Image (spheres, rainbow, N blue to C red):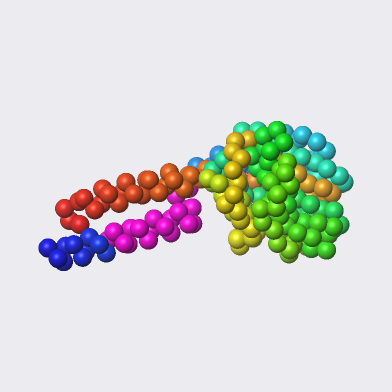
Amino acid sequence: MKILLTMRFIICVFLVVILICLCKTKIVSGNVLYEEDFEDGIANGITIESGSYIISSGLNSTHGFKQPSCCNAVISLDKVQSDNVSISIDFLISGSNHGDFDTYLNVLSLNRYEITNSPGGSDTPLAVIMERPEGIELDSRLNTINAGEIHSLKINRYGSNIDVYLDDNLYMQTSNANHHGGLIKFRSWDAVTIDNIKVTSLPEPTTSVLFFIGLLLLWTNRKIC
Ligand SMILES: [Ca+2]
Ligand SMILES: [Ca+2]
């Protein structure tokens, strides 16, 4: 009996560790909600809200989407919302001085979160997660990218969290993002090329925790455990 209890305890600890790891790495993620590589020469599911974007040479591919010159240009994704999603996109900033490339999340009226990336040495020295309209900086760090380089950006937006990865490295994060609902938009200033946009669903942390607690209870009530 004592051996069985010890085995049950070890298995429970093991499952809890797996749960924590899965939640941390977002392996319990879901479906592809939107994907666009521009290789068909058409920007499907994208609305140009201001400025101009055109089909151009891609980033290590035949076709991409480009804002060819100054100044402000904003595009939005028509069919996906920004709650509990992972957004990935490749980008190349051409303009070295004013080349902001921003992702807007949870755009509802004046409320939104802005994730800004600019080349080092530009007039925007910090990469930031900014809450609007108040202009509250939720996280920031010095820009490390240069104009003319291809970079990948991934943003995980789940619960009240925003995790920003640059070239697969965690770059900025906040757990204080309390606006929900709304659109995903990209905003650029000066020449920027984007490619390989992908949006996948992420479960809210509470959902995944409850799911695995359920699995844990089922497992621990089995007779072999
Ligand atoms: Ca492409
Ligand atoms: Ca397309």
The image quadrant that residue 169 belongs to is bottom right
Say which residue appears at 21% left-offset and 65% top-offset. Answer: 6
Which quadrant does the N terminus fall into? Answer: bottom left
Q: Nearer the viewer, residue 174 or 169?
A: 174
**Image location (x, y in percent) of residue 142:** 73, 63
Q: Residue at x 43, y 44 (%)?
A: 207
| Left or right side of 168 for 122 | right
**Residue 80 seen in render:** no
In the rendered picture of this protein, how many numbered marks are placed on residues?
Answer: 0
Residue that lies at the very extreme toward the left in this rendered image: 1
**Height in image: 129 above or below 77?**
below
Side (left or right) of 40 relative to 68: left
Percent x, y for residue 116? 73, 52
- Residue at image point 59% right, 49% down: 176
Predominant SS of the magenta segment = helix
* Front residue of this view, candidates 77 and 150: 77
110 in relation to 15, above or below: above
The answer to if 192 sits in the magenta stretch is no
Where residue 7 sits: x, y (%)? 21, 64
Residue 201 shows in this picture: yes
Which segment is the magenta one?
11-29
* Nearest to the observer: residue 141 or residue 222: 141
Compared to 175, does 149 lie above or below?
below
Q: Is residue 27 left or right of residue 80?
A: left
Taking the image as shown, residue 13 lies to the left or right of residue 115, namely left
Q: Which residue is found at the position 20% from the left and 57% from the top?
A: 225
- Image quarter of residue 11: bottom left
Q: Position of residue 197 (x, y in %)?
A: 64, 46
